Amino acid sequence: MDLAQWITIGVAVAISVLLVTVVHWLLTHKLRRVWSLAGPLVERCRGSAYAAAAVIGINVALPNRGELADRSVFPLLQHGMSILLIGALTWLALTAAYAVTDTVLLKLAERNADDDRRSRRLQTQVRLLRRVVATIIGFLAVAAILFTFPAVQGLGAGLLASAGLLSVVAGVAAQSTLGNIFAGLQLAFSDALRINDIVVFQGEWGRVEELSLTNVTLRMWDERRLVVPVSYFATSPFENWTKQGASITGWVMLQVDWSVPIEKIREEVGSFVTEHPLWDGRRWSLQATDILDGGVVQLRAVATTADADARWDLACDLREHLIGFISTNYPEALPRGRTEFIAAGEDDYATAFPQSAFRRGRPSAATDEPGGAEAPRGAGSPGPDGSVGVAGSRGTEGGSRGSGTDDDGRGDDDGDGGNDGE
């Protein structure tokens, strides 16, 4: 191309970019205050609009085949500019679609509280529809680019002729992907799951942060992100704490002794809950719900809150308060284990414990008869009546053997310890 042709292309591109600049200025300074779509269009379509303007300017000023010195370059140049035009217009269409949906989402976000079910449902559906529209636009753009190639055009006619068979093959090959896509549409439009819903997944609760065609992203309470396939929520039961509203009931379980003054605990629960800032004013209660194994009474304190976050904080505060209150004012009501000792007769005791010290310490028959072997010195063993004999004694007979004294109290001269008359 000669210099004049390059100048023509440059002027066309400059005019196109100038027009986009004028539109950008009008949207920013004149229409932004009166048109809610002006701001999102400026933010989303700035780069795509300038790119599309430049490509359109080049295509408009592109010389014909006869105006080129080397005519063999014209098909390649024209084909390349067609692909660029399709890509630029696709980018502009995607950004415009996102700008329109951003306007809707911005209005919904202003009243996106947990108890606004309609707002969260519309927000979920708009986000999902935006992804569907973007997918369709991208698919059509890729198809249009492919059909600019002559070889693909012939293939496309054959594909259209065998569309029935190809749809079956594609359905079988992409069964899981299509299942997730339809599951996402089902969740969004059946109002079963919405953005910012609080759900319980495998024992842990989190908020729905993102709902796409294939996955659901949950923001857990400890700021982890859990990515779950959409098909799980479409085929498995799950808890949705904000399905009908954000209000929820919290509870605290206590295990106490039978001696607990339930009325006093109930009064303390009522006094604490009604003065707590997180209580929503609907109801509270304290009830003895069960008698557990081991003789422990189970109490359940209940209080209502406006949302799940307040429920957790109020339950923890109430639990801490009751622990301190019971341990300080009623320590005897703390849970304890009991053991009861039952007295039994001699025969029952001896039968149950044949090797006990009670049986081993009983005096033998030899020590009870005159002339029998003397019991060893030391601590006496208890008799049948429970009395404890003195070591070396024989009941009430005679004095102590080996005491060294006579019957009259005088000391024994021979020191044999026996009576002189014997």
Image (tube, rainbow, N blue to C red):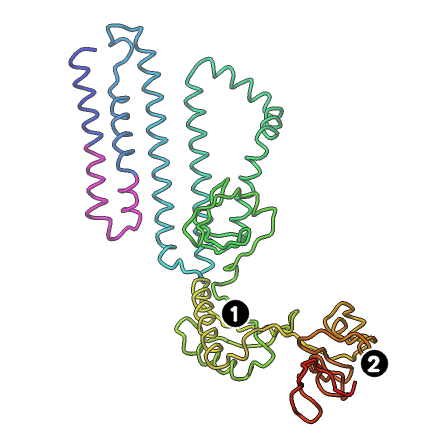
Residue found at the very far bottom of the displayed protein: 408
Residue 121, horizontal then vertical, whole percent: 47, 54
Magenta residue span: 18-44
Determine the secondary structure under disc 2.
Answer: loop
Q: Nearer the viewer, residue 8 or 292?
A: 292
Q: Is residue 81 left or right of residue 183?
A: left
Q: Earlier in the sequence, mark 2 or mark 1?
A: 1
Residue at position x 74%, y 70% in the image: 356
- Residue at 53 percent across and 77 percent down: it is 285
Q: Nearer the viewer, residue 43 or 82?
A: 43
How far apart in space, not on screen, are marks 2 and 1 (Cα)? 75 Å
Determine whether the residue tagged by mark 1 lies in a helix, strand or loop.
strand
Looking at the rendered structure, which numbered label has been put on residue 203? none
Three-letter code, disc 2: Pro
Tell which tag, 2 or 1, sits nearer the viewer: 2
* Lateral position of residue 195 relative to residue 333, left or right: left
Give the residue number, with chain letter if any, for mark 1: 252
> Do tag 2 and tag 1 residues touch (Cβ < 8 Å)?
no
- In this view, the residue farthest toward the front is 414
Front position in the image: 59 or 341:
341
Q: Compared with residue 2, is residue 233 higher up or lower down, i.e. above or below?
A: below
Specify whether 214 is left or right of 408: left
**Which of the two residues, 314 or 307, is positioned nearer the viewer here?**
314
Magenta stretch: includes residue 33: yes
Figure quadrant of residue 367: bottom right
Look at the picture and state if 96 lies above or below 417: above
Looking at the image, residue 263 lies above or below residue 373 = below
Q: Amino acid at mark 1?
A: Val
Q: Magenta stretch containing residue 225, yes or no?
A: no
